[in-house]
Amino acid sequence: MDAICVRGGNPLFGEVRIQGSKNAVLPIMAAALLINDICIIENCPRITDVEYMKLLLSEAGCFVSHSDRKLVIDARCATGERMSKEAVTGMRSSIMLLGAMLGRFGKISSSYPGGCVIGKRPIDIHIRALKKMGVRVREEADGFTAKASHLKGCILNLPFPSVGATENVILAAVKAEGDTYLYNAAKEPEIVSLCAFLNKAGAQITGAGSDRIKITGQKPLHGITYRVPADRIVAGTYVCAVLGAGGHVLLRDAPYGEMESMVRIATLAGAEVAWSGEGLSVLMEQKPRPIANVKTAVYPGFPTDLQSPLLAALTAAEGVSVLEETIFEDRFRIVGELQKMGADIRIEGQKAIVKGGSRLRGACVSAGELRGGAGLVIAGCMADQETVITNRHFIDRGYEDICRDYQNLGVNIVAGKTE
Ligand code: EPZ
């Protein structure tokens, strides 16, 4: 089985270049499908979720080539209406192609995207919004068919600022007749980068980054070159690693302006965090201070994707910390694995109460999903002796080469296989 082996117990020293953002590049790849031209996407991370999206775009008739971190998508011959079940169920964010396929072809047949261990991951908000734009949806046994003879702009108010639903509405509205006004839109930086990509290609979108976005439909779109911003969640993961293990690191290209909530928490925990002009410098010379109450929230609140990495780090704090998960219903899968390493954590509803102070001990643990897996690697860096983390493939979905990054920070870590 694919695994990672870490021999921890030492502080981290060194520097890491932060990769391009997974959650920014995936909707941008979907947006390229809307453009009957060639798009070049630079700083594209080499992760398996990008591989899945490349497969889906190829199935839709695009020509996709990827060398190093430059992705070329030629959508001039795109014709697809159907995506393979394995590709769609293999990757949750395939649902992002819903808006783009409707915008380009007016039709899509798809399986329901896989849920995952962090929650049911419904798409009701997506479907309800698209129906208001004129999409007819027929639910079938193992999926659905969505059709729109023509998409029409309208006024939409999302019941929850869903990131994916915001992205799908934008992707469909770019091709709709008239204007679309989207209220209670998600404000995540990934929405801003998607709209920057589309506006550079000729779209007319205002308000990205706020909860009110206006999209003027049917502006002619042309191919562009666009550079994917750095991944704020990968950068935040490594901030949590330094909080837990100690040390002094430089995170080159970290998107400092998008990390305010992580920087605030790190400072509360006792870290010295500063922007050095080249990257984010994080210095931690003592055990982290416990944090009485961290609540995940939509942007600009503390990101749910950093909840597990922070939970792992706070097992080193002398005292009690409380983390509350408000976005997903089942995002504490890492707790059972951390308990195998000696962590004192109990769950009360949507809260994890961490009684820290004793050093974690090495163990054989298993990643259950992407960010929980990243949290276990942090725990491995903190624990003395050796920790083996199986199911590395979950981590490879969002981290280009987590072993390479930690090796650059002086960690004794290797990727391998267990019998
Ligand atoms: C995006 O997922 C990210 N994924 C997630 O990152 C991230 O955790 C999440 O946004 C929140 O920031 C990508 O961008 C590819 P949502 P998404 O729609 O769009 C509920 C990672 O680790 N909901 O904002 O699926 C949903 O169940 C991943 O990189 C509905 O009920 O998130 C969840 O509880 C994990 N109905 C909440 O809203 C819907 O129709 C937030 O979901 C849609 C969502």
Image (cartoon, rainbow, N blue to C red):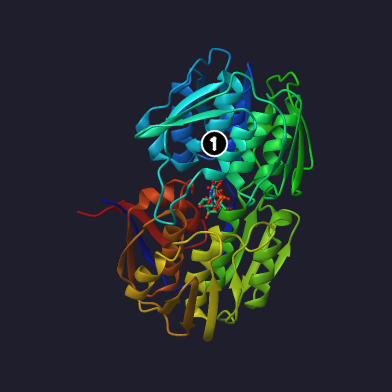
- 368 with respect to 259 (left or right): left
Q: Quadrant of the C terminus?
A: bottom left
Q: Residue furthest left?
A: 419
Q: Which is nearer the eye, 335 or 387?
A: 335
Residue that carries the numbered disc 1 in the rendered image: 96
Q: Which is nearer the eye, 57 or 377?
A: 57
- Residue at (60%, 50%) from the top-left corner? 17
- Residue at (67%, 43%) from the top-left corner? 191
> Residue 278 appears at what percent x and percent y?
72, 53
Total count of labels? 1
Q: Is residue 303 visible?
A: yes
- 87 with respect to 35 (left or right): left
Q: Is residue 43 visible?
A: no
> Residue 164 appears at what percent x and percent y?
58, 43
Q: Secondary structure at mark 1?
A: helix
Give residue 87's quadrant in the image.
top left
Q: Is mark 1 within 8 Å of ligand 1?
A: yes
Q: Is residue 146 above or below residue 77?
A: below
Q: Is residue 168 above or below residue 286?
A: above
> Residue 351 appears at what percent x and percent y?
50, 74
Q: Which is nearer the eye, 4 or 391?
A: 391
- 352 with respect to 388 (left or right): right
> Residue 216 appears at what percent x and percent y?
77, 29
Q: Mark 1: which amino acid?
A: Met
Q: Which is nearer the eye, 72 or 115?
A: 115
Label 1 crowd bin: few (<14), some (14–19), many (20+), radius 10 Å: many
- Residue at (63%, 51%) from the top-left corner? 159
Q: Residue furthest top?
A: 77
Give residue 103's quadrant in the image.
top right
